[in-house]
Amino acid sequence: MIRICSTEDVPKGTVISADVDGTQIALVHGEDGQFYAVYDECSHAAVALSEGEVEGCTLECWLHGSRFDLRTGEPTGLPATEPVPVYPVEVRDGDIYVSLTPSNGVTR
Ligand code: FES
């Protein structure tokens, strides 16, 4: 697992982008208090999901409004139909770590 930042760097309900060994990820602090990481590109068109809005346990694409469930990577609404890769996140001693092996089996 790779250390990204401190938990304090990502307030609840916000998202940041991070380059993890050359992979762009969107790191989210969900409104449920959990941290999530997904590949930082919408599966509909190549725009950054980290520029979208956090809603509960979803991240909304700013361009056409598809929402991605951060636990499964699946879009909950059109126009996106394909899931995005979800990366395992661990919090240790106030730091956030991410693994680049997708937990939902989706590769980019
Ligand atoms: S680019 Fe994200 S929904 Fe269209």
Image (spheres, rainbow, N blue to C red):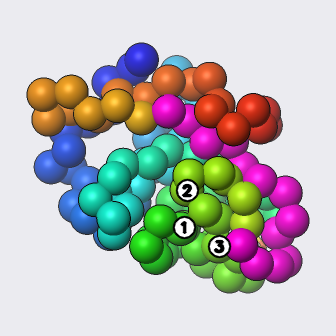
Q: Residue pushed farthest top?
A: 1
Q: CA distance from mark 1 to mark 2?
A: 7 Å
Q: Which residue type does callout 1 highlight?
A: Leu
Query: Which residue position holds label 3?
Result: 67
Q: Nearer the viewer, residue 81 or 25?
A: 81
Residue in the image at 34% along x and 31% along y: 90
Q: What secondary structure is marked by label 1?
A: strand
Ligand 1 picture quarter: bottom right
Work out whether residue 16 can be spotted: no
Q: Position of residue 55 (x, y in %)?
A: 46, 76
Q: Amino acid at mark 3?
A: Arg
Q: Main secondary structure of the magenta part?
A: loop
Which residue position is annotated with label 1? 59
What range of the chain is rendered magenta? 76-88
The N terminus lies in quadrant: top left
Task: Please name which of the two marks, 1 or 2, marks the residue nearer to the observer.
Answer: 2
Q: For mark 2, what is the residue? A: 70
